[in-house]
Amino acid sequence: MSQYNLSNIYKAVVIGGSAGSFQGVTKILSQLPEDFELPIIMCLHRLKHVRNGFVEALSIKSIKEVTEPADKESIKKGGVYLAPSNYHLSVELGNRFSLSTEEMVNNSRPSIDITLETAAYVFKNKLIGILLSGANRDGAIGMMKIKQKGGMTLVQDPEECMIDTMPNAALQVTEIDHVLKIDQILDFLIELNKQYK
């Protein structure tokens, strides 16, 4: 399958992003195939006091409905999930979500590292991690954990990012499989989906 090693059967996609990532996320969600099989779990930094509007803005652009999962909610095939404002979003064994209001990590709640690390623990080599534009180092350790568990790692090309701190931090701590522009990430996901048909 082109330049990507997609021989593995993946179970989930997890996406992290902060400042400058909204435009990239909306482009991906607006052009994903409607029958995209894998659950997409997103942890995006957002204003903790603004609870409304963000998921709605993503849903307007998205081909698929975007939801904020409840604590202990099951992860469903083809679902698109967004970490709720001011809650850490973890993935638990048994393919369920867990929400918590524990201390901030990297000055962030939700923490991208927590979402990525817990997803890596559950899905192991069946996980694809994607890290987009952002202004701090949150997500770098999470990407390293995905790589250590045998998952696939992608970061947005720092040259395309509005703020390149986040992808560069990941590139510093682990060997990232692919450095791609948003259009290429979308192409990758479309190519990935073909193996489930």
Image (cartoon, rainbow, N blue to C red):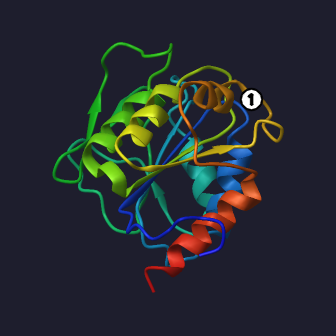
| Residue under the image location 54 percent in, 77 percent down | 34
Give the x, y percent position of residue 143: 48, 36
Q: Say whether residue 86 is left or right of residue 160.
A: left
**Location of residue 38 by image quarter:** bottom left
Q: Is residue 16 above or below residue 106?
A: below
Q: Say whether residue 63 is left or right of residue 102.
A: right
Give the x, y percent position of residue 73: 24, 51
Q: Residue furthest bottom?
A: 197
Q: Is residue 175 above or below residue 32?
A: above
Q: Is residue 28 above or below residue 77?
A: above
| Residue under the image location 50 percent in, 13 percent down | 107
Instruction: Look at label 1 and name its amino acid.
Output: Asp
Reading the image, the residue beneath label 1 is 164
| Residue under the image location 74 percent in, 29 percent down | 164
**Location of residue 1 by image quarter:** bottom right
Q: Is residue 90 visible?
A: yes
Q: Quadrant of the C terminus?
A: bottom left
Label total for image: 1
Give the x, y percent position of residue 94: 16, 52
